[in-house]
Image (cartoon, rainbow, N blue to C red):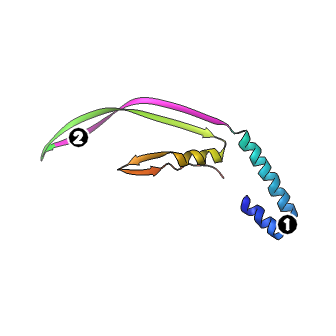
Amino acid sequence: MGLLRREADFYQVQALIEAVQEKEEELSKAEQNATLNITLKQRVQTIRFTVREAPQIYSLSSSSMEVFSANILSTSCFFLKLLGSKLFYYCIGNLSSIRTLAGP
């Protein structure tokens, strides 16, 4: 929207300038009235795996771990992008950011 506003201003297309301003005001109001819904779940999950003890000797082992999941719904794209920039996870020793799927 900012780029479109600058282009409309540069070429002095008054109807487009006004339309962009109206849309920006509408989006601003929508951001102020944003909805946020978060549901959290916690469960214990058992993971089973094989352990190689010797060249041809394997044993079955298991481990229990707590698994947490969060479903986050927001009508504010700005909030989702900001939240996504603050969440990280470890995978094979590397720190990675979580990417959010946010609308336009």
Q: Is residue 44 magenta?
A: yes
In the image as oriented, which residue stretches furthest toward the right?
Answer: 14
Q: Which residues are magenta?
A: 35-52
Between 42 and 7, the one nearer to me in the picture? 7
Q: Quadrant of residue 65?
A: top left
Q: Looking at the picture, how far across and down is residue 55, in whole percent?
A: 12, 47
Q: Earlier in the sequence, mark 2 or mark 1?
A: 1
Between 44 and 94, the one nearer to me in the picture? 94
Q: Is residue 56 magenta?
A: no
Give above or below for 101 relative to 48: below
Q: Residue flagged by tag 2: what amino acid is it?
A: Thr
Which label number is shown at residue 50?
2
70 lies left or right of 52: right
Between 32 and 56, the one nearer to me in the picture? 32
Q: How many marks?
A: 2
Secondary element at tag 1: loop
**Which residue corresponds to the image point at 21% horizontal and 36% vertical from the top-left?**
60
